[in-house]
């Protein structure tokens, strides 16, 4: 997925494509970080529940 964007980024001289590329990268990292945080919180909640029992 990323190489495709890298090709567009390197060959395009238009700022619109560059802005879109940067936006995609930021959105991708934000989403993955958010889902990782959610998984981590869920995991700690499950561990706390099992520890109490």
Image (cartoon, rainbow, N blue to C red):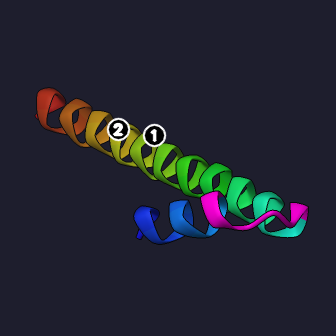
Image coordinates for residue 17, horizontal then vertical, percent: 78, 68
Position of 48 with respect to 29 (left or right) is left
Image coordinates for residue 41, horizontal then vertical, percent: 40, 38
Q: Give me the disc on residue 25.
A: none
> Cα distance, mark 1 to mark 2?
5 Å
Near-viewer residue (30 or 50): 30
If the image is split into quadrants, where does the N terminus sit?
bottom left
Disc 1 packing (10 Å; few <14; some 14–19; many ≥20): few
Near-viewer residue (42 or 7): 7
Name above or below for residue 15 compared with residue 45. below
Position of 18 with respect to 32 (left or right) is right
Near-viewer residue (11 or 47): 11
Quarter of the figure with residue 18: bottom right
Part of the protein shown in magenta: 10-15
- How many labels, in total? 2
Near-viewer residue (7 or 20): 7
Position of 2 with respect to 15 (left or right) is left
If the image is split into quadrants, where does the C terminus sit?
top left
Identify the residue at horizontal 45%, vertical 40% (top origin).
37
The residue that mark 1 highlights is: 37
The residue that mark 2 highlights is: 40
Secondary structure of the residue carrying numbered label 1: helix
Image coordinates for residue 27, horizontal then vertical, percent: 65, 57
Do labels 1 and 2 touch, CB within 8 Å?
Answer: yes
Secondary structure of the residue carrying numbered label 2: helix
Furthest toward the right, the residue is 15
Identify the residue at horizontal 49%, vertical 43% (top origin).
33
Image coordinates for residue 26, horizontal then vertical, percent: 66, 49
Position of 10 with respect to 2 (left or right) is right
């Amino acid at each position: 997925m990323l190489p495709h964007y890298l090709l567009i980024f390197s060959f395009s001289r238009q700022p619109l494509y560059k802005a879109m590329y940067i936006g995609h990268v930021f959105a991708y990292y934000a989403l993955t970080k958010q889902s990782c945080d959610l998984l981590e919180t869920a995991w700690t909640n499950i561990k706390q529940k099992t520890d109490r029992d």
